Image (cartoon, rainbow, N blue to C red):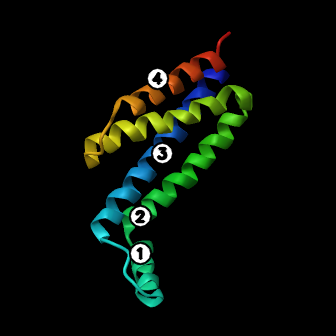
Amino acid sequence: MGKLLGYGFVFLMVLLGVYGQLMLKYRILLAGALPEGWFPKFIFVLRLFGDPWILSAFASAFLGSLCWMAAMTKLPLSTAYPFTSLTFVLILIFSALFFQEPIGFYKLLGVALIIGGIIVANWA
């Protein structure tokens, strides 16, 4: 049961990380391009830090770190760490769905290699 709980913490950490990245991208797209000049850039970034959705992305990173610490009490690092590459797979899928980013042959090949690597790394 402890090992299963460890995998649960790893997958929760992955999902929280994916949420954070997608939310940052979404809110920054809505905010627009980075302005010219250091003071307008400073105000732009300051405004982003006041966005509750951006803050939720930061909170998800913190909660993901807590999940990772909990996972480390249940699993060896060499077992758990390869699963973090699932963030690449999920980001690719969700960025295509939400942001209409293209998925080409090489990206699909990369995803297949990542999944194959996770399987091989956790064989046995």
- N-terminal label among 3 and 1: 3
Q: Quadrant of the N terminus?
A: top right
Badge 2 local density, few (<14 within 10 Å), some, or many (20+)? many
| Amino acid bearing label 4 | Ala
Q: Are marks 3 and 1 in contact (CB under 8 Å)?
A: no
Tell me which label, 2 or 3, sits earlier in the chain: 3
Residue 27 position in % (x across, y down): 33, 63
**What residue appears at the point 31 percent right and 71 percent down from the top-left corner?**
31
Q: Secondary structure at mark 4?
A: helix
Q: Secondary structure at mark 2?
A: helix
* Residue that appears at 73% across and 34% down: 73
Which residue does the image show at 43% across and 59% down from the upper left? 56
Which image quarter is the C terminus in? top right
**Image marks 4 and 3: residues in contact by CB distance under 8 Å:** no
- Which amino acid, by three-letter code, is at mark 1? Gly
Q: Secondary structure at mark 1?
A: loop
Query: Which residue, given by chain and number where applicable, does mark 2 sit on?
Result: 54
Q: Earlier in the sequence, mark 4 or mark 3?
A: 3
Q: CA distance from mark 4 to mark 1?
A: 39 Å
The Cα atoms of the two marked residues, 2 and 1, are separated by 8 Å
Q: Residues within 10 Å of mark 1 (few under 14, many from 20)?
A: few
Residue depth check, mark 4 versus mark 1: number of the one nearer the observer: 4
**Relative to the observer, which residue lies in front, 75 or 22?**
22
Per the rendering, the mark at residue 112 is 4
- Residue drawn at (38%, 55%) of the image: 23
Q: Hey, what amino acid is under mark 3?
A: Leu
